Amino acid sequence: MHPQCPISALLLSRIVAANKRGRQAMALSLPEGSCAELALFLYDDPEMHHVARDIAAVCDPIMVIRKGGAKGIALLAAADELPAIRARCRPAA
Protein backbone atom coordinates (compact mmCIF):
# COMPACT_ATOMS: atom_id res chain seq x y z
CA MET A 1 0.00 0.00 0.00
CA HIS A 2 1.38 3.39 -0.99
CA PRO A 3 1.02 6.37 1.33
CA GLN A 4 -1.36 9.12 0.34
CA CYS A 5 -0.03 12.40 -0.92
CA PRO A 6 0.02 14.87 2.02
CA ILE A 7 -0.98 17.85 -0.16
CA SER A 8 -3.73 18.64 -2.64
CA ALA A 9 -3.50 17.42 -6.22
CA LEU A 10 -3.45 21.04 -7.42
CA LEU A 11 -0.48 22.00 -5.24
CA LEU A 12 1.31 18.78 -6.18
CA SER A 13 0.90 19.53 -9.88
CA ARG A 14 2.27 23.05 -9.36
CA ILE A 15 5.27 21.77 -7.43
CA VAL A 16 6.06 19.14 -10.07
CA ALA A 17 5.76 21.69 -12.88
CA ALA A 18 7.91 24.32 -11.16
CA ASN A 19 11.66 24.73 -11.41
CA LYS A 20 13.92 23.88 -8.45
CA ARG A 21 13.66 27.34 -6.87
CA GLY A 22 9.86 27.36 -7.20
CA ARG A 23 9.55 23.86 -5.78
CA GLN A 24 11.63 24.78 -2.80
CA ALA A 25 9.70 27.99 -2.18
CA MET A 26 6.38 26.13 -2.23
CA ALA A 27 7.75 23.37 0.00
CA LEU A 28 8.91 25.95 2.55
CA SER A 29 5.28 27.08 2.93
CA LEU A 30 4.28 23.61 4.16
CA PRO A 31 4.36 22.45 7.79
CA GLU A 32 7.59 20.54 8.57
CA GLY A 33 5.85 17.17 8.76
CA SER A 34 4.00 17.67 5.49
CA CYS A 35 7.18 18.78 3.74
CA ALA A 36 8.98 15.61 4.82
CA GLU A 37 5.99 13.42 3.94
CA LEU A 38 5.79 15.00 0.49
CA ALA A 39 9.48 14.43 -0.21
CA LEU A 40 9.16 10.79 0.88
CA PHE A 41 5.94 10.32 -1.11
CA LEU A 42 7.62 11.61 -4.26
CA TYR A 43 10.75 9.55 -3.64
CA ASP A 44 8.63 6.39 -3.99
CA ASP A 45 8.29 7.17 -7.72
CA PRO A 46 11.60 6.87 -9.60
CA GLU A 47 10.42 9.48 -12.11
CA MET A 48 9.95 11.98 -9.26
CA HIS A 49 13.31 11.50 -7.52
CA HIS A 50 14.57 14.88 -8.77
CA VAL A 51 11.51 16.63 -7.33
CA ALA A 52 11.83 14.71 -4.06
CA ARG A 53 15.50 15.71 -3.75
CA ASP A 54 14.68 19.39 -4.32
CA ILE A 55 12.02 19.28 -1.61
CA ALA A 56 14.09 17.24 0.84
CA ALA A 57 16.82 19.88 0.60
CA VAL A 58 14.55 22.39 2.39
CA CYS A 59 12.95 19.99 4.88
CA ASP A 60 14.13 19.49 8.44
CA PRO A 61 16.46 16.51 7.96
CA ILE A 62 15.65 15.00 11.33
CA MET A 63 11.94 15.07 10.41
CA VAL A 64 12.69 13.30 7.10
CA ILE A 65 14.59 10.59 9.00
CA ARG A 66 11.86 10.24 11.65
CA LYS A 67 9.13 9.92 9.04
CA GLY A 68 11.07 7.80 6.54
CA GLY A 69 13.66 5.82 8.46
CA ALA A 70 16.18 4.25 6.09
CA LYS A 71 14.32 5.68 3.11
CA GLY A 72 14.62 9.14 4.64
CA ILE A 73 18.36 8.71 5.07
CA ALA A 74 18.67 7.57 1.45
CA LEU A 75 16.65 10.56 0.26
CA LEU A 76 18.77 13.01 2.24
CA ALA A 77 21.94 11.39 0.92
CA ALA A 78 20.61 11.76 -2.64
CA ALA A 79 19.83 15.41 -1.90
CA ASP A 80 23.28 15.92 -0.31
CA GLU A 81 21.54 17.06 2.90
CA LEU A 82 22.61 14.49 5.48
CA PRO A 83 22.60 16.12 8.91
CA ALA A 84 25.39 15.90 11.42
CA ILE A 85 23.43 13.41 13.52
CA ARG A 86 26.11 12.88 16.15
CA ALA A 87 26.43 16.60 16.74
CA ARG A 88 22.67 16.91 17.29
CA CYS A 89 22.55 13.97 19.67
CA ARG A 90 25.38 15.09 21.96
CA PRO A 91 24.34 16.66 25.25
CA ALA A 92 25.22 20.30 25.66
CA ALA A 93 28.36 20.86 27.72
Image (tube, rainbow, N blue to C red):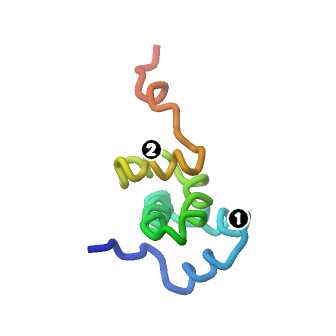
Binning the other alpha carbons within 10 Å of mark 2 as few (below 14), some (14 to 19) or many (20 upward) gives some
Tag 1 residue:
20
Residue carrying label 2: 62
Q: In the image, 22: left or right of 68?
A: right
Residue 67: give its label. Answer: none
- Give the quadrant of residue 17: bottom right
Looking at the picture, how far across and down is residue 62, in whole percent? 45, 44
Residue at 42% x, 22% y: name it: 90
Which badge, 1 or 2, is on the more N-terminal residue? 1
Callout 2: SS: helix
Q: Is residue 9 above or below residue 67?
A: below
Q: Residue at x 34, y 49 (%)?
A: 69
The kind of secondary structure element at disc 1 is: helix
Q: Amino acid at mark 2?
A: Ile
Kindly identify the amino acid type of the residue bearing the numbered disc 1: Lys
Please identify, in this view, whether the residue under mark 1 or under mark 2 is nearer the observer. 1
Residue 31 spot, x, y in % from top left: 50, 62
Q: Up-down: is 89 above or below 63? A: above
Q: Residue furthest top?
A: 93
Q: CA distance from mark 1 to mark 2?
A: 22 Å
